Image: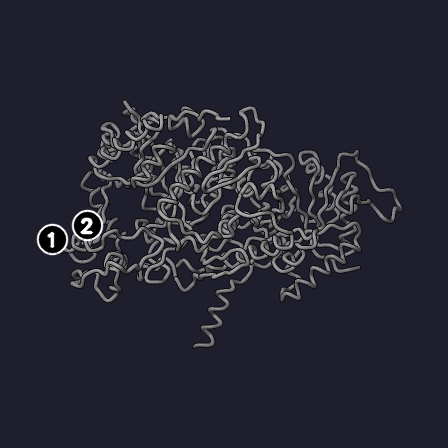
Amino acid sequence: MKQMHLAAHFPGVNSTTVWADPRSASQIDFASFEHLARIAERGKFDFFFLAEGLRLREHKGLIHDLDVVGRPESLTVLNALAAVTDRLGLAATVNATFNEPYELARRLATLDHLSAGRAAWNVVTSSDAFTGENFRRGGFLHRADRYTRAAEFVATARELWDSWTPEGVPRPFAHSGRHFGISGEFGVPRSPQGHPVVIQAGDSDEGREFAASAADVIFTRHGTLEAGQAFYADVKARLAKYGREPEDLKVMPGVTVVLGDTDAEAQENAAEIRRLQVSPQNAILALEQVWGRDLSSYDADGPLPTVDPDPDAVLAQGRVRVDDPLAVAARWRALSEAKGLSIRRTVIEATTRQSFVGSPDTVATALETFVATGAADGFILVPHLTPGGLDGFVDRVVPLLQERGTFRSDYTGPTLRSHLGLAEPVWKG
Amino acid sequence: MTAIRPLHLAAEIGGPPRYDAASHIALARLAERGALDFVSLGDSFARPGPDAVAVLAHVATRTSRIGLVPTVTTTHTEPFHVSSAVATLDWVSRGRAGWHADVSTTEAEARLFGRRRAAPAAALWQEAGEVADVAARLWDSWEDDAEIRDAATGRFIDRDRLHHVDFQGSTFSVKGPAIVPRPPQGRPVTVVDATTGPAREPAARYAEVVYVRASSPGQAAALRDEIRRSAAAHGRDPDGLRVLVALTVDLGDAETTPEPGLVSGPQLAGHGTYFRGGPVDLAELVTQWYRSGAVDGFHLTPLTPGRDLERIVNGTVALLQHRSLFRTFYPGGTLREHLGLARPANRYALQRTATEATTS
């Protein structure tokens, strides 16, 4: 039976980390990272995944203060984790817009050496002048440009990683392209994996094409089984034109799991978590982001505003904005009226993404179904608690998957590529 | 005799490039056994070698007390990324991070990035000073108690305790605040090598540890006085910085002891940058310079780290400890505590409380 891949996401800056829970510890202390990484390694996970932040989010011109704020820098944390883990892959999200190929390729190759072949890079891009205010370039790239830059960035990094011979002899490189014109000698020999694993996050058409051409893993949003199957078929079909096989790109949606002793208990737990995630203040904030208006005088337990959204207003910065506020508002109003829901309960219902909720057996079966029916190759688990949010999954679900042969019982190789079943890239000297 | 200040000792653990961390871990542990203030790891885009911040982050989890000071160049990097990485090194080491701020001067380094041409040292050091300045501002941009987790109001942080730095430098600007909360030491320790002229000014303005090169105690004392005066002129308390003599040491010779009555003691070669002799000779030199009050300590670069650091720790340091000139254990946990440097007050917290006092 086909085995799945599993990764652990360190939860943080989002609206789903329940920081008010008494079990929620520091989001910053190294002990929290170490705990989650050790649990993931005990569960024989493929990799540990860190997101990135480059500018604090703002809402109505003020720093957003309701959710977890702040995080340490990913590559530095992962280099530290490399010393306290043996097998776990270590994936850093690093922006291709606000970095330069030579420096980042060197940092990624260093992590691959220090971890003996466990490094991964999740390539993200930004078209956000707001984030750019922290950087030299001034930081604005048009949407199309940011992907051409990212594609050239990855290609350039691979030229650098290939610039030493497998025997360890450095050779000069020269890259001349639209975004980068660089030359010299790379500072780091070919690393244990040849190239660190490349992950691409995002569901857009450009993102899918970029992943099909250049990525080893695509980190997507979790949808329904049908949506997952459609996405999976689409990205796998794009590989052929780049001379790649379907198994060369692993599809790994980010998912949440809520467990209970029974399915009913798990549903209760899930409802309670959603209630904690959408506090009254967060419900108003979510509404303001759609409406583009100051709604601070509204009661979260009361009805939705009768005033229409201002589609041109931008209250939130540092986040993907709502695409079509008028349509979203219409949907939320319809939902509220049909079920007689307050603002808070509307937001809870409208923004709850499908998760795997149930007893360990139910969840294990559901995960297996996604993999067996071509909706995913594996999953990036996003817990709602730091750092113990995956303890239950590793203790209760992983053993079931192992018994059924749908997940490895032990690591079979030393590198992240070996966990993912990815070949070492051919050296292109 | 001049009043004796605590002696500070640090060692470089670079040497020929190594890409697995085993040798770096072994050397850092050895230095930690000698209770040295910190180990440094040189770095440059100009020559082969791993990223120094990465290596010392790795070493952090395998050591417990010793300070960790990677070289970080400021010419081709993003100041915002630099401040985040160094702050994170402080978090993963629980308050043991510093950074040696350096510049990239060559056309070859510029070509690796392709963004700008090589620039004169004076301009690069001015920029390096600005990077040190903005890094410190970013480390202050979160007040220490900014995270409040106030369930009643639903607020994770108190946004009044986070600050845009709005920094405008000559070659870059940074809006802020930092992404990384204020690190355990408040600000990781800033180190500058003031050997070259253009580095003196940023060293006096921003560094807390300054390397100098001198061939006699008199010369070292003069350099130290100059840097302290310059720091005072910038409004700093000169006691808030430590001047270390940087010395490359070759202890490959057979063990020798200084001849009785040799007044001048062990000699330095190469404009005061190079010492060759035995571990006891080195201890003698350190003792003489230190007792004359000329220096706060030494930053030693072993010519052959595996061999020489072992001789420094088991020979030189052991003798200095025997003479009660150097600590035998760490009384504190952070690099600042080893160096006797206070945890800096947060500038924004000071401003805010001052404003609150005048408006209330």
Image quadrant for the N terminus of chain B?
Answer: bottom right
The picture quadrant where one finds residue B248 is top right
The x and y percentages for residue B125 are 62, 54
> Mark 1 is on which residue type?
Lys
The x and y percentages for residue B322 are 74, 45
User: At 24% from the left edge and 67% from the top edge, which residue is drawn?
Assistant: A297
Please rate how many residues cluster around mark 2, counting C-alpha atoms within 10 Å: few if below 14, some from 14 to 19, many from 20.
some
Give the vertical position of B204 relative to B318 (above or below). Answer: below
Q: Residue furthest left?
A: A338
Q: Chain of mark 2?
A: A
* Number of numbered labels in the structure image: 2
Give the vertical position of A166 relative to A358 (above or below). Answer: above
Identify which residue, A258 or A315, lies in the foreground: A315
The residue that label 2 is drawn on is: A349
- Mark 2 and mark 1 residues within 8 Å of each other at the beta carbon: yes
Give the vertical position of A141 relative to A233 (above or below). Answer: below
- B247 left or right, relative to A282: right
